[in-house]
Amino acid sequence: MITSTAWRGKRYAVLGLARSGAATVRALVASGASVLGWDDNEAAQRSVWEQLKADRLELDTEPGFTTKDWVSFPVDLSGFDAVVVSPGVPLNRHPVVEKAAKYGVPVIGDIELFAQARAELPPHKVVGITGTNGKSTTTALIDHIVRTAGLPSLAGGNIGLPILGRDPLPEGGVYVLELSSYQIDLTYRLDCDVAVLLNLTPDHLDRYEGFAGYAASKARLFEMQSAGHAAVIGIGDEPSAAIARQIATTGRSEDITRIAPGVCMDQSRWPALQGQHNAQNALAAIAACEALGIDRPAIDKGLETFPGLPHRMERVASRNGVLFVNDSKATNADSTTPALSAYPRVHWILGGLAKTDSLEACRPGFGHVVHAYTIGDAGELFACLLEGEMPVERSGTLDAAVRSAAANAQPGETVLLSPACASFDQFKDYEARGQAFRDAVEALG
């Protein structure tokens, strides 16, 4: 795990003891910090406490001190150095934020703790990737290219295992961090050697005062950078282009690489990077890796051998000439559009827990859709939106949609799960939804 003398002798309160919270507690306690940890799930708290005991580390509290206790318990926070919360804690409305402010205690996340620990790690570089869509693919792609070039690399942040729970990289290593706006909100001193902004479209607006607040959160990744460190920005949308212009006004114009939309790329040698959106992801990854000093032959080899991500335009099977593609990670309309456009004739399975009552962002791909199959909570809404644009079946469940689409699809066509929705109405998360799609395809025989 990553530890730091910067935390020794300090007091931290950690809210949320799932994967990142548990890793944070262990790293802080192992560094000699005093930690008060809690969760509204007693089993999660007990698991962390037992693990600390097994590691011969000590937590300040016994199991049973929960978030409900915290909200009502009159704890004097004046002696704490920080409250560490998971990115899922809504800073605009959670009581812990107001309580911390009362005592003048900063609210931070595990990425900020990583930033504090960097001075004691072997010499390394950090690439931070943010944006509304494409973060996971670009993060995984950069990590793959760096490894292909023979450099130690670790992908973390909003992807993979918690960063504080990983072993430090040796000298010359590269930490490749996928960063959501929520994680950036909890971070204050992460000076990325390369910072990447892919795009900006409306998302997570329940956490911000409008779209401008969301965009400002993303822009902070560049505000934390030192002059001379590289900024890679997709300028296919005006909000992202505006951030690039703002950075240029600070005297950093030479630091910026702008990724323009519609650049023609030969993607024929990159089987896992099809579609215009992946051309933009690849361009951003190329620019980031060039900024790290990786030569073009190594970059080309990485692009050619990149295996892709599970649940993101994942080729599940080909049956009787029909391709089945799992794009369960497409949880909003903007992220579904590229998948629709990547295949010429699509049987589109969509629906779930809607983030918006519009599918207009998907319209550029409507001409590719042979038939739509709606599922889940948004099934009726989406069926009404699409009727008149294409044939629609109200399938209701994913299993039913897969069976209908498979029966209707002809050789050369694609059955695509790209829901444009969150998964929580019928599944634990998008990964469970993607696995259910795989299982349904397998069950076709």
Image (cartoon, rainbow, N blue to C red):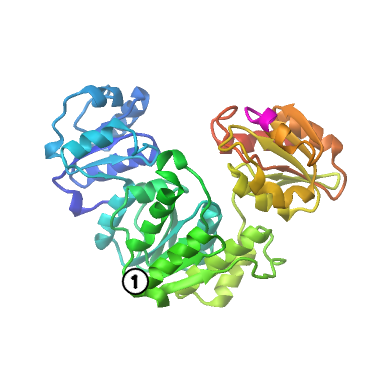
In the rendered structure, does residue 109 fall within the stretch colored magenta?
A: no
List the residue tagged with mark 1.
250
Is any part of residue 162 visible from this angle? no
In the rendered structure, does residue 380 fall within the stretch colored magenta?
A: yes
Q: Position of residue 365 (x, y in %)?
A: 72, 51
Q: Quadrant of the C terminus?
A: top right
The magenta segment: 376-381
Asked whether 423 or 185 is in front, the reply is 185
Q: Amino acid at mark 1?
A: Thr
Occupied quadrant, residue 442: top right
Q: Residues within 10 Å of mark 1 (few under 14, many from 20)?
A: few
Task: Say whether residue 113 is left or right of residue 193.
Answer: left
Q: Position of residue 54 (x, y in %)?
A: 29, 34
In the rendered image, the vertical position of residue 421 relative to residue 305, given as above or below: above
**Residue shown at the point (32%, 45%) measured from the top left:** 109
Q: Position of residue 122 (x, y in %)?
A: 30, 64
Is any part of residue 199 visible from this angle? yes
